[in-house]
Image: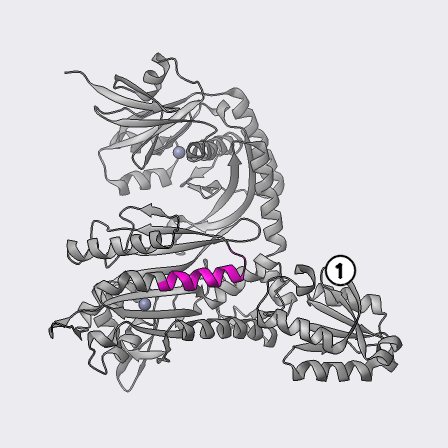
C-alpha cells in the first residue's frame, strides 16, 4: 500500500508520498517561499509530518495565512534576543495576537524605551544570522529537567500542567522553547517588525501571582503594511476616547469611587439620548414593544436561568431580610418573567420585547478599559419569542435593523455565522432547522458571510456583526443568538394551531451592543467630530464684539425654538480665538455675527472643516440645518449638496 498525500499549490495538485512537509516540498523542487500549509482549518508549518490521505494546501511567506508563522517566529526571536541580553530572563508565554505578538517575561531589570531599542537591535542581528529552526519532540520528564537546568520555572510549570507524555519543542541556535508552533523554517525569513510597548501582566492572569513584563510587538511581511499599521496606531492614540471624552466634556471616570463605571456629563448624555432616540423610533417601526425590568432580582431566578452555575463569578450580589439578590448581568430572565404572565397563542407570536437594560458584570480591575470594557453598561437588548417557522423572517427583520443602524454611521461590516458545537443541547432537528433558517435569511438578503463551524453556543447558533471604523479597526457589536435552552428552563409555552402546547424559540439580539462601548467607538471613529444630529452642541454663535452679544442671544433663542442645540461665546476675546476654540470643541457650525449681520438679520456661517459659507438669512440656515438633523446626515448638508 502506498502512503500518499495530496498537495495543492497555485491551483495545481501533486500526489506524493507522505513525510515531513519540508522534505516533500524540497524533493518536488517547489517554490522556495513555501512556509506552510492548510489542512481543513488547521495551519501547519514545514516541520509537520503528514499523514496518509491528507490534503494540504500550501502557502508562501507573503500570503495572509503565513502571518501566524511569521509572528510566532518573531516572538521567539524576541525571546532569543532577550536571553542574550539579560542572563536572568525567565520566560512565561509568548503567543501571537491580532497584528502582532507578545512575550511575558520575568526580569529584574525594568524594560523601558531604550531597552526596547536594544532588544530590537539584537533581534535584527538574529535575523541577519539566518538561524535555521528545528522541531522535535521531548519526553515530558526530560523537558522538565531541561528547563529546570536552564532556570526556567514557568516553562516547568507549564509542562507539568499540560500533563502530556511528550512536549513539542522548537530550537533556533542557542534558544530553545516549548511551543506547538507553527513557525517559518529560518530566522532570516522574517524582517519587518517593531516592538511597541511594555506593560505589567500577572503570571496566568492571576493577581495573586507575580507581575511579569509583557513586551508587545508587531510584524508584517511587507514594509508598507507595517508602516500603515504603525500609522494607524498613532492615529488611534490621538483618537483615544479616554482622552477625547474628558476633553469634550462628555464623560469622566472615577476609579477611586466607581471603578469600571462611567459618569456621563450633560454633553455625553446628549450623545447617548440621541442614540436612544433613533433606536426607539426604529424599534417601534419594526414592531417591538419596550419594557423596563428591575435591576435587582431574587437569586433563585438566576439559579433557574443557569447564570448561578456558569456566571456567578461575574455577578454582584446583595442581601436584605435574609434573602439573597443578584444585580442583573443580563436582561433575558426579566423578559421571560413578563412572557410568563400570560398565555400565548401562535397568533400572538412573534413577540418582540426590547429594553435599554443596564447590566452589571464584574471584570477584573486589570481589564477594565474606559467605555470599551466597563463593569456597568446598557445593552440595547431585545428578545424575540417566536415559532420555529418564524425564525427566518425574524432574522431578516433584525438584520435589516442592524444594516440601517450601521449605514447611519458609515460603518461597513462583516458577518459571521457560528454553527453547532460538540457540546450542543437540543435535538439535531432543531439545530438543522434553525441553522438553515439563519443561512437562508442571510442569503435572502444577499449577504456575504463567513461560517465558523462549531463556534456556536451550546444552546443555539448565532450571527455576529463586526463593524469597520474610519481607521480600519474592526469591532464586534451586534449579535443575534438563537436559544433553545431558556424556553426549556423556564417552561415557556404557546398554543399552536394544532391546539397543542409548543416551546417558542428565543432570539437574543443587540445592535449597538452596549451604549457605552458604542459611544466609545463613535468617539474614536469620528475623532470627536460627531455628525450634527448627535453633536452635543450643534451651533455656536460668536459675536464679534460686545455690542453684538445681545443679537447673538436672540439668535440662540430662535434656534432653540427649533430644537437646535446652541451656545453663545459672549466672552470679550478676539473672534479668531473664539473660532479656534469652537473648532477644538468640534462644534459643527460657527455662526459669526457683527454689525452687518445684525442689520440684515443674518449670520455668517462657518463649517467645522474650516469652510466659509458666507452670510445667510437666519431662517434659511435654520431650514437647512433642521433638514440635516432630521435626516440624520453624516456630513454637513452644505458639503453634501
Ligand atoms: Zn512559537
Ligand atoms: Zn438575552
Q: In which quarter of the image is the C terminus?
A: bottom right
Residue 538 at least partly seen? no
Locate residue 414 relative to residue 562 in the image: left or right: left
Depicted 124 relative to depicted 19: above or below: below
Q: Is residue 399 magenta?
A: yes
| Residues shaded magenta | 397-411
On-image quarter of the N terminus: top left
Of residues 636 and 235, which is closer to you in this image?
A: 636
In the displayed structure image, the side of residue 624 where residue 180 appears, left or right: left
Q: Does the magenta stretch include residue 156?
A: no
Q: Residue at x 21, y 23 (%)?
A: 52
Residue 369's spot in the image, x, y percent?
50, 60
Q: Main secondary structure of the magenta part?
A: helix
Residue 181 drawn above or below residue 348: above
> Which residue is drawn at the image coordinates 34% and 29% (left, top)?
169
Q: Is residue 537 left or right of residue 287?
A: right
Looking at this rendering, what residue extends furthest in the bottom direction? 321
Residue drawn 25% across and 54% down?
A: 435
Quadrant containing ligand 2 reads bottom left
x then y, percent, for residue 478? 41, 60
Its colouring scheme is: one colour
Q: In which quarter of the image is residue 494?
A: bottom left
Left or right position of 432 against 629: left
Q: Where is residue 428 drawn, in percent x and y?
A: 16, 53
Label 1 Cα crowd, 10 Å radius (few <14 / some 14-19 / many 20+): few
Residue at the spot of label 1: 610
Amino acid at each position: 500500500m502506498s502512503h500518499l498525500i495530496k498537495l495543492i499549490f497555485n491551483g495545481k495538485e501533486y500526489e506524493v508520498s507522505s513525510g515531513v512537509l519540508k522534505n516533500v516540498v524540497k524533493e518536488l523542487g517547489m517554490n522556495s517561499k513555501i512556509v506552510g500549509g492548510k489542512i481543513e482549518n488547521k495551519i501547519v508549518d514545514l516541520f509537520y509530518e503528514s499523514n496518509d490521505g491528507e490534503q494540504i494546501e500550501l502557502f508562501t511567506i507573503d500570503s495572509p495565512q503565513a502571518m501566524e508563522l511569521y509572528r510566532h517566529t518573531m516572538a521567539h526571536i524576541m525571546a532569543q534576543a532577550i536571553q542574550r541580553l539579560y542572563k536572568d530572563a525567565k520566560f512565561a508565554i509568548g503567543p501571537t495576537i491580532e497584528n502582532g505578538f507578545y512575550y511575558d517575561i520575568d526580569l529584574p531589570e525594568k524594560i523601558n524605551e531604550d531597552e526596547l531599542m536594544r532588544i530590537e537591535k539584537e533581534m535584527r542581528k538574529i535575523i541577519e544570522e539566518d538561524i535555521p529552526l528545528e522541531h522535535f519532540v521531548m519526553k515530558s520528564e526530560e523537558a522538565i529537567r531541561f528547563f529546570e537546568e536552564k532556570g526556567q520555572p514557568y516553562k516547568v510549570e507549564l509542562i507539568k500542567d499540560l500533563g502530556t507524555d511528550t512536549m513539542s519543542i522548537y530550537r533556533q541556535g542557542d534558544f530553545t522553547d516549548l511551543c506547538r508552533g507553527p513557525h517559518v523554517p529560518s530566522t532570516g525569513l522574517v524582517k519587518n517588525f517593531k516592538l511597541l510597548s511594555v506593560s505589567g501582566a500577572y503570571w496566568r492572569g492571576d493577581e495573586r501571582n507575580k507581575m511579569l513584563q509583557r513586551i508587545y510587538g508587531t510584524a508584517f511581511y511587507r514594509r508598507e503594511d507595517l508602516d500603515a499599521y504603525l500609522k494607524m496606531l498613532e492615529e488611534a492614540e490621538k483618537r483615544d476616547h479616554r482622552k477625547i471624552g474628558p476633553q469634550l466634556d462628555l464623560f469622566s471616570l472615577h476609579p477611586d469611587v466607581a471603578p469600571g463605571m462611567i459618569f456621563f456629563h450633560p454633553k455625553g448624555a446628549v450623545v447617548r439620548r440621541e442614540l436612544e432616540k433613533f433606536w426607539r423610533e426604529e424599534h417601534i417601526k419594526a414592531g417591538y414593544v419596550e419594557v423596563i425590568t428591575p435591576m435587582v432580582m431574587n437569586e433563585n431566578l438566576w439559579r433557574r436561568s443557569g447564570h448561578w452555575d456558569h456566571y456567578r463569578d461575574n455577578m454582584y450580589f446583595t442581601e436584605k431580610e435574609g434573602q439573597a439578590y443578584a444585580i442583573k448581568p443580563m436582561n433575558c430572565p426579566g423578559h421571560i418573567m413578563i412572557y410568563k404572565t400570560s398565555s400565548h397563542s401562535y397568533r400572538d407570536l412573534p413577540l418582540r420585547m426590547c429594553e435599554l437594560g443596564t447590566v452589571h458584570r464584574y471584570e477584573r480591575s486589570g481589564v477594565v478599559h474606559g467605555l470599551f470594557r466597563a463593569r456597568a453598561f446598557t445593552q440595547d437588548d431585545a428578545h424575540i419569542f417566536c415559532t420555529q417557522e418564524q425564525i427566518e423572517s425574524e432574522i431578516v427583520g433584525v438584520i435589516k435593523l442592524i444594516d440601517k443602524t450601521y449605514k447611519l454611521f458609515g460603518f461597513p461590516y462583516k458577518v459571521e455565522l457560528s454553527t453547532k458545537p460538540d457540546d450542543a443541547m437540543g435535538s439535531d432537528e432543531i439545530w438543522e432547522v434553525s441553522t438553515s433558517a439563519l443561512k437562508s435569511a442571510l442569503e435572502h438578503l444577499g449577504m456575504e458571510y463567513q461560517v465558523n463551524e462549531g463556534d456556536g453556543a451550546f444552546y443555539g447558533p448565532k450571527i455576529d456583526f463586526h463593524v469597520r471604523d474610519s481607521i480600519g479597526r474592526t469591532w464586534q457589536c451586534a449579535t443575534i443568538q438563537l436559544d433553545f435552552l431558556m424556553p426549556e428552563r423556564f417552561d415557556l409555552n404557546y398554543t399552536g394551531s394544532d391546539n397543542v402546547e409548543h416551546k417558542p424559540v428565543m432570539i437574543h439580539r443587540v445592535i449597538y451592543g452596549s451604549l457605552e462601548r458604542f459611544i466609545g467607538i463613535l468617539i474614536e471613529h469620528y475623532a470627536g467630530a460627531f455628525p450634527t444630529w448627535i453633536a452635543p452642541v450643534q451651533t455656536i454663535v460668536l459675536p464679534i464684539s460686545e455690542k453684538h452679544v445681545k443679537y447673538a442671544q436672540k439668535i440662540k433663542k430662535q434656534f432653540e425654538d427649533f430644537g437646535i442645540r446652541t451656545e453663545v461665546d459672549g466672552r470679550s476675546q478676539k473672534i479668531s480665538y473664539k473660532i479656534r476654540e469652537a473648532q477644538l470643541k468640534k462644534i459643527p457650525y460657527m455662526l459669526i455675527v457683527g454689525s452687518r449681520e445684525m442689520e440684515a438679520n443674518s449670520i455668517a456661517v462657518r463649517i467645522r472643516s474650516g469652510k466659509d459659507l458666507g452670510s445667510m438669512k437666519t431662517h434659511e440656515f435654520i431650514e437647512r440645518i433642521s433638514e440635516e438633523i432630521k435626516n440624520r446626515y453624516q456630513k454637513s448638508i452644505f458639503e453634501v449638496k
